[in-house]
Image (cartoon, rainbow, N blue to C red):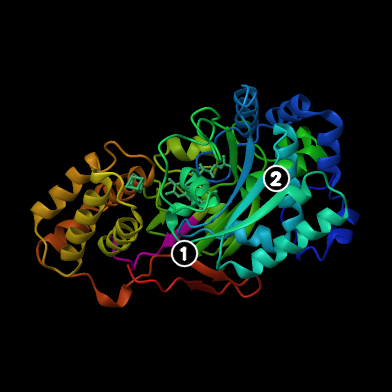
């Protein structure tokens, strides 16, 4: 049996090429087995969501299906293709190289839920990926894939919050990317008081794995990875590494194998997995990359995007860039989040310029304890983890800035929000938006 993988080396040219390589069998199998057995197959594989939280996908599909059995409720499927986490590019790579697998995965979920419509919500400026998705859908309609004609590709804004699942549903409904109160399984698409319309929202990579699991079987998926985190993950590695890129690897690979051996990091000082987790344990490179081990190590797998910082980097400046990004992206519906993130960014700016004091450091620490009070979404939880952990792991750098020593300008770093990552050369272009 070939090694399990979902990301082809070369872009899949068209539906004929996809089918010739075995594509389409997952949807066929799902239709043949029916909803209950399909959910059982996804559960047996142990697939966990690849959008950040690692929630078990089979459990999500099963519970949304149960919730949708209430009279008057209409279930929907939404694919989260907003990909806005700094340091992540894998969803764009998948959509560009294998849009057919994504369409297939979404239609499998739609068949499980017996959803009248399904949606792929994607940033409007991912024009190449949208083009590939449109072609894949057109060819899926021609190939009579069930549900392909009831799939909508919805372009959305360049906001970080667009990728938050409750905001994603708002965008699909034509509103702003501001998270609603309740999660998609409770208040889904086009919900009313009488009809909650529970909705499955999953990440691009999660749907692609679902298609492969339906075609290849749970054993093939479990033939790689760990007991807790089976399968492969498409890691994005950028920052101070010799070979930035997207790499599909079995979960359980160590940080050292991934960052040092594969991507060519040399003596990393810090690692961030997006802006939702504490700063990574550069001294613990032998930790396996799986949901449990990384979280036990005080880090997090997130959506598999790792930003590596070399010894030359100034960690106060990195904390300031991340805080400025999060403060700007906070939508302002929750007071502690908007004010707390803005205050942290401002005080970190003072420290970077050598104008801050030890009291600023203490105030930032206090802010991290309250920034997520009464929050509708996890954005401020992420900022608290990120900022507080950088202060705790690098206290001497903050103490120096608080004594009036500014950050060195030559190591200024952009917020590593990726605009493009060339597959062949590894060249990374970061977004130019100023925060
Ligand atoms: C601020 C914020 C931004 C997020 N951005 C993304 C994103 O760009 N893509 C994504 O798939 N999930 C993102 N998520 C996670 C989603 O809310 C959700 O958990 C995920 O889409 C569920 O899919 P999964 O179960 O397949 O992982 C974000 C969460 C937060 C709090
Ligand atoms: S927690 Fe922050 S980002 Fe999330 S909804 Fe509230 S204000 Fe907006």
Q: Earlier in the sequence, mark 2 or mark 1?
A: 2
Asked if disc 2 and disc 1 are in contact, CB closer than 8 Å, the reply is no
Q: Quadrant of the C terminus?
A: bottom left
Residue occupying image coordinates x 29% and y 40%: 372
- Vertical order, 246 against 292 (above or below): below
Q: Quadrant of residue 33?
A: top right
| Residue 311 painted magenta | yes
Instruction: Answer yes or no: disc 1 within 8 Å of ligand 1.
Output: no
Nearer to the camera, 224 or 150: 150
Tell me: 329 left or right of 13: left
Q: Position of residue 210 (x, y in %)?
A: 71, 41
Q: Nearer the viewer, residue 369 or 165?
A: 165
SS for tag 1? loop
Specify whether residue 410 is in view.
Answer: yes
Residue 106 numbered tag: 2
Q: Residue at x 34, y 71 (%)?
A: 434
**Is residue 208 found left or right of 182 in the rendered image?**
right
Q: Mark 1, residues whose alpha carbon is within 10 Å: few (<14), some, or many (≥20)? A: some
Residue at 68% in and 28% down: 43
Pick the quarter of the image with the N terminus: top right
Give the camera-side residue of 266 and 14: 14
- Residue 225 lies, with reference to residue 168, above or below; the image says above
Q: Which residue is mark 1?
A: 266
Give the percent coordinates (x, y) of residue 263: 56, 63
Span colored in magenta = 306-315
Dot in front, 2 or 1: 2
Distance, label 2 to label 1, CA atoms, is 40 Å
């Amino acid at each position: 049996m070939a090694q399990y993988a979902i990301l082809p080396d070369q872009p899949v040219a068209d539906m004929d090429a996809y089918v010739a390589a075995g594509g389409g069998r997952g949807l066929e199998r799902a239709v043949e087995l029916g909803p209950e057995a399909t959910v059982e197959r996804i559960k047996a594989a142990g697939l966990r969501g690849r959008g950040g939280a690692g929630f078990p996908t089979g459990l999500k599909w099963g519970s949304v299906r149960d919730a949708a059995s209430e009279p008057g409720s209409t279930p929907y499927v939404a694919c989260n293709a907003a990909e806005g986490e700094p340091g992540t590019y894998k969803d764009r790579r998948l959509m560009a190289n294998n849009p057919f697998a994504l369409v297939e995965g979404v239609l499998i979920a739609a068949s499980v839920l017996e959803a009248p419509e399904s949606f792929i919500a994607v940033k409007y400026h991912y024009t190449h990926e949208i083009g590939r998705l449109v072609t894949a859908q057109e060819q899926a309609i021609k190939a009579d894939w069930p549900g392909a004609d009831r799939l909508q590709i919805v372009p959305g804004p360049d906001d970080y919050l667009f990728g938050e699942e409750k905001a994603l549903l708002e965008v699909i409904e034509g509103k702003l990317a501001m998270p609603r109160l309740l999660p998609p399984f409770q208040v889904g698409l086009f919900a009313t008081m009488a009809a909650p319309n529970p909705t499955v929202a999953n990440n691009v990579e999660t749907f692609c794995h679902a298609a492969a699991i339906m075609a290849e079987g749970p054993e093939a998926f479990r033939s790689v990875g760990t007991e807790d985190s089976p399968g492969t993950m498409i890691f994005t590695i950028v920052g101070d590494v010799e070979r930035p890129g997207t790499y599909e690897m079995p979960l359980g690979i160590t940080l050292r194998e991934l960052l040092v051996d594969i991507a060519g990091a040399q003596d990393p000082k810090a690692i961030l997995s997006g802006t939702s987790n504490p700063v990574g344990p550069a001294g613990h490179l032998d930790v396996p990359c799986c949901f449990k081990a990384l979280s036990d190590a005080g880090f997090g797998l997130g959506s598999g995007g790792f930003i590596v910082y070399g010894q030359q980097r100034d960690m106060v400046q990195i904390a300031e860039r991340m805080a400025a990004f999060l403060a700007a992206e906070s939508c302002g519906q929750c007071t502690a989040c908007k004010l707390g993130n803005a205050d942290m960014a401002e005080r970190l700016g003072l420290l970077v310029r050598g104008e801050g004091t030890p009291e600023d450091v203490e105030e930032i620490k206090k802010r991290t304890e309250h920034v997520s009070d009464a929050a509708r979404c996890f954005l401020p939880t992420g900022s608290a983890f990120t900022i507080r952990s950088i202060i705790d792991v690098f206290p001497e750098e903050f103490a120096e800035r608080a004594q009036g020593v500014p950050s060195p300008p030559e190591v200024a770093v952009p917020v590593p929000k990726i605009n493009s990552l060339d597959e062949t050369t590894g060249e990374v272009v970061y977004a130019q938006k100023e925060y």
